[in-house]
């Protein structure tokens, strides 16, 4: 059984290691097949692919797309894409541009709550001029003494109902799946246990995803409890979807699972890589 890790981030989005360093760390820790899945970005894939060739690890071109489904932000992991495909590249460009405007609004919203200059503060933590995320705001808020750690920063400032949270419309589910499939990739609902959806809403999301041609559910993820691995395995089977797994690694010490620490996919699930 090969060790797959199909979800992680580099400095091209909100991770703290370069694409090459991500690949090196994964290889050293026993990962055999790795997908780099930066948020709304494919710019790190060339570097990661080159590093993978040197270390002998098998590499999968990926991305994690931000989607708005019924007012909820949902992430869709794309695996095995052609990163140069025009429709996908243009779609990701549009999502990233939306991030810039959103970040300014987050800064304004925090200023109104008495935290000035958070936009410039977050910019100091940005590691790719192409992408700013709430993670960069969180790192600034921690170092400026407004929050204890990542969890605290999100809970106090960056989630729904908090002063630094602003509504934002990402891509639609149909757009994201259209781009991913046009680019030859498989589409995976990332960490389905993380969304604030009722059980009925989650089933509606999965049904719509399946009807749009979606391929898999991410089952094994640090966002899930072991009990949820079984729940999502059952949902995947019920909806005729495959299963995926990934650490969602963002940097040493920032993720619950480091590379090489992922439990296996539950038995009875058809892995998304079966056809690779
Ligand atoms: P964004 O795409 O700009 O909305 O930022 C989302 C990112 O923030 C996620 O990919 C995570 O890396 C991070 N994030 C979201 N919620 C939390 C949390 N509660 N604790 C730590 N990181 C979080
Ligand atoms: Mn992230
Ligand atoms: Mn995500
Ligand atoms: Mn992620």
Image: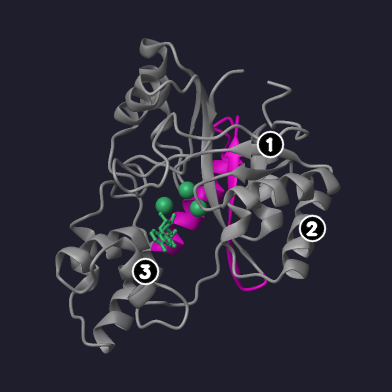
- Foreground disc of the pair 1, 3: 1
- Confirm whether the magenta stretch covers residue 98: yes
Residue drawn at x 45%, y 63% as measured from the top left: 98
- Magenta region: which residues? 70-99
User: According to the image, label 2 marks what residue?
Assistant: 208
Report whether 193 appears left or right of 231: left
Work out whether 275 lies above or below 73: above
In this orientation, which residue lies closer to the viewer: 18 or 248? 248
Q: Quadrant of residue 17?
A: top left
Q: Quadrant of residue 1?
A: top right
Work out whether 160 lies above or below 260: below
Whole-angstrom CA distance, mark 1 to mark 2, is: 24 Å
- Foreground disc of the pair 1, 2: 1
**Picture disc at residue 266:** 1
Queried on whether the Cβ of the residue with tag 3 lies below 8 angstroms from ligand 1, the answer reads yes
Whole-angstrom CA distance, mark 1 to mark 3, is: 31 Å
Q: Residues within 10 Å of mark 1 (few under 14, many from 20)?
A: some
- Circle 1 — which element? loop
The mark nearer the N terminus, 3 or 2, is: 3
- Circle 2 — which element? helix
In this orientation, which residue lies closer to the viewer: 213 or 135? 135
- Foreground disc of the pair 3, 2: 3
- Circle 3 — which element? helix
Q: Residues within 10 Å of mark 2 (few under 14, many from 20)?
A: some
Queried on whether the Cβ of the residue with tag 1 lies below 8 angstroms from ligand 3, the answer reads no
User: According to the image, label 3 marks what residue?
Assistant: 154
Residue 74 in picture, x, y percent from top left: 59, 60
Work out whether 145 lies above or below 191: below
Q: How many marks?
A: 3
In this orientation, which residue lies closer to the viewer: 147 or 183? 147
């Amino acid at each position: 059984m090969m060790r797959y890790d199909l979800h992680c981030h580099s400095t091209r989005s909100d991770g703290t290691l370069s694409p090459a360093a991500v690949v090196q760390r994964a290889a050293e820790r026993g990962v055999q097949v790795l997908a780099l899945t930066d948020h709304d970005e494919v710019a790190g894939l060339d570097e990661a692919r080159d590093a993978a060739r040197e270390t002998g690890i098998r590499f999968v071109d990926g991305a994690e797309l931000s989607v708005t489904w019924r007012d909820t932000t949902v992430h869709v992991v794309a695996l095995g894409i052609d990163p140069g495909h025009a429709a996908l590249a243009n779609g990701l460009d549009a999502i990233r541009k939306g991030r810039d405007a959103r970040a300014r609004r987050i800064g304004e919203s925090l200023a109104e709550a008495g935290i000035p200059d958070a936009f410039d503060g977050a910019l100091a933590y940005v590691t790719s001029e192409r992408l700013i995320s709430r993670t960069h705001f969180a790192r600034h808020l921690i170092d400026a003494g407004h929050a204890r750690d990542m969890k605290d920063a999100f809970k106090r400032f960056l989630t729904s109902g908090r002063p630094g949270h602003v509504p934002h419309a990402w891509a639609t589910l149909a757009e994201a799946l259209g781009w991913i499939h046009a680019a030859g990739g498989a589409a995976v609902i990332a960490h389905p246990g993380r969304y604030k959806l009722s059980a009925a809403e989650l089933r509606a999301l999965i049904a719509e995803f399946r009807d749009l041609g979606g391929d898999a559910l991410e089952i094994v993820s640090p966002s899930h409890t072991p009990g949820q691995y079984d729940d999502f395995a059952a949902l995947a089977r019920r909806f005729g979807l495959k299963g995926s797994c990934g650490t969602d690694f963002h940097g040493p010490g920032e993720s619950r699972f480091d590379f090489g620490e992922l439990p296996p996919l539950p038995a009875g699930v058809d892995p998304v890589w079966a056809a690779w």
